Image (cartoon, grey):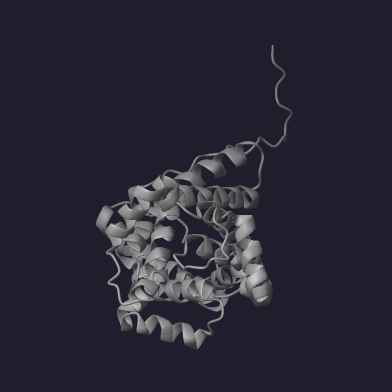
């Protein structure tokens, strides 16, 4: 006969897997689509242009983009690549992060560690599932302007995609995917951790108790700090852009890896070269935060009315 559990003993907390709801996917996809179609893609184009042309100042990067087609120049790569990425990456993140967080907690991880584990795993899955080829094609679109400068009409988006696929196969359209994976996993991990750290600081400064909900502007501030400060990994973003760029340079390594690309950038432009484009990237992080946090509550209400489901995703 089994011994009875002693009185007053604490039973282990049951780990429950968070359900993946259609309403959550719709909310994430809708907010991502809004973010990228408004200021997201222009900031992405500025960031990529500065990372690919590392001698440019912020002002000269703006001039370079404007010369490519005025306002349209700031939206290069939006359709279809940025839209495909925006509409799919949220679903991938939710599915994988939920599974990873569940298994981490089932092995005894705390809520904090489980959340970071889920975010990092989701970030890697994003890179290899959809973001690899989407970021590659966006970068190709943004950096192929030298063809037009030579007086030749550049090929269309899908023509470029098929040309790369015929010449280099799956690897060609996923060029730089390892760098994307490193960026995503460090970005999500640090964004989560730094946001939680900022929330703790805000609670202390405002006299709120641990676990007490923050106000709207406080949430924006905490998430904005997390998003902006997560740009510390900008060197891997510059490496990613260089690996995917169509820029012609005889000094570039023929077969580019994360390691030899980092050396090439450092030898060409020094340590500053590895941080080119960090300003628009911080701006992008703040804009994403405003969309996800400040507009999230309004979008949440709209999705709940449309689907009849309670949205449980955190934004």
Q: Is residue 139 visible?
A: yes
Residue 216 can be seen, yes or no: no
Residue 269, above or below 5: below
- Location of residue 131 in the rendering, given as x and y in whole percent from the top left corner: 44, 55
Image location (x, y in percent) of residue 295: 39, 71
Q: Residue furthest front?
A: 250
Q: Give coordinates of residue 315: x percent, y percent.
A: 46, 61
Residue 26 to residue 201: above or below: above
211 to the left or right of 171: right
Residue at point 28% right, 53% down?
A: 308
Residue 33 horizontal/vertical position (percent)? 34, 64
**Residue 70 falls left or right of residue 8:** left
Quadrant assignment, res 296: bottom left
Position of residue 1 relative to residue 97, above or below, is above
Q: Quick one: 281 or 196, which is closer to the camera?
A: 281
| 269 with respect to 277 (left or right) | right
The residue positioned 44% from the left and 71% from the top of the image is 44
| Quadrant of the image containing the N terminus | top right
> Within the image, what quadrant is residue 263 found in?
bottom right
Is 188 in front, or is 267? 267
| 60 versus 52 height, above or below | below
């Amino acid at each position: 006969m089994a011994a009875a559990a002693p009185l007053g003993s604490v039973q282990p907390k049951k780990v429950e897997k968070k359900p993946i709801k259609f309403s959550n996917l719709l909310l994430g996809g809708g907010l991502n689509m809004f973010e990228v179609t408004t200021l997201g893609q222009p900031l992405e184009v500025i960031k990529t242009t500065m990372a690919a042309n590392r001698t440019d100042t912020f002002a000269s990067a703006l001039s370079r983009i404007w010369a490519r087609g005025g306002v349209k120049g700031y939206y290069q790569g939006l359709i279809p690549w940025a839209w495909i990425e925006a509409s799919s990456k949220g679903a991938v993140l939710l599915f994988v992060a939920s599974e990873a967080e569940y298994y981490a907690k089932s092995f005894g991880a705390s809520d904090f560690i489980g959340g970071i584990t889920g975010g990092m795993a989701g970030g890697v899955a994003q890179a290899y599932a959809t973001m690899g080829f989407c970021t590659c094609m966006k970068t190709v679109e943004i950096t192929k302007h030298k063809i037009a400068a030579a007086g030749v009409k550049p090929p269309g988006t899908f023509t470029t995609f098929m040309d790369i696929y015929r010449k280099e196969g799956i690897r060609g359209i996923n060029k730089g995917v390892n760098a994307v994976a490193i960026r995503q996993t460090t970005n999500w991990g640090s964004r989560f951790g730094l946001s939680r750290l900022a929330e703790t600081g805000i609670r202390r400064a405002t006299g709120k108790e641990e676990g007490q909900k923050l106000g709207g502007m406080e949430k924006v501030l905490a998430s904005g700090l997390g998003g902006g400060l997560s740009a510390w990994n900008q060197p891997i973003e510059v490496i990613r852009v260089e690996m995917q760029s169509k820029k012609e340079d005889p000094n570039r390594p023929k077969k580019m890896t994360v390691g030899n690309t980092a050396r090439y950038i450092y030898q060409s432009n020094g340590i500053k070269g590895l941080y080119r484009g960090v300003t628009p990237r911080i701006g992008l992080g703040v804009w994403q935060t405003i969309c996800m946090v400040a507009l999230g509550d309004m979008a949440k209400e709209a999705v709940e009315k449309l689907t009849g489901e309670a949205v449980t995703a955190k934004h």
